[in-house]
Image: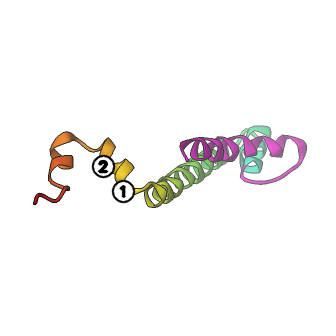
Amino acid sequence: MAGVRTSAVQVVATATLAALIAGGGLGRYIVDGLATQDYVKTAAGAVLVAALALATELSLSGVQQLLVPRGIRLLNAPVAARATTFKVA
């Protein structure tokens, strides 16, 4: 699942390049801002793209938490946390 998260964030970040070939999207703000030397517009576009990439990362991180089985999560937990989760007869 980590590969899917990384790929999704990379797609969001590189999708801004579509504006260079008149594809539109959030990259349009960056390209238009650079063309008119309106750096506030460029910075706003960059912040929007970064926010979308972070939202993608956080949402897919939550999905990953839901999809990973409990046993595998326990293996990655600290030793002290693992010892308290097993039943003792």
Q: Nearer the viewer, residue 86 or 49?
A: 86
Instruction: From the viewer's perspective, tell me whether residue 69 is left or right of residue 21.
Output: left
Colour theme: rainbow
State which quadrant residue 56 falls in. Answer: bottom right
> Between 3 and 79, which is closer to the camera in this rendering?
79
Query: Residue 65 placed where, x, y %?
Result: 43, 56
Answer whether residue 8 is magenta in the image.
yes
Amino acid type, mark 1: Arg
Q: Which residue is mark 2?
A: 74
Numbered range of the magenta stretch: 1-26
Q: Residue at x 45, y 54 (%)?
A: 68
Q: Residue at x 59, y 41 (%)?
A: 3
Quadrant location, the C terminus: bottom left
Count of numbered badges drawn on the protein: 2
Q: Nearer the viewer, residue 75 or 64?
A: 75
Find the distance from the CA under tag 2 to the CA under tag 1: 6 Å
Residue 70 numbered tag: 1
Q: SS class of the residue under badge 2?
A: helix
Neighbour class for label 2 at 10 Å: few (<14), some, many (≥20)? some
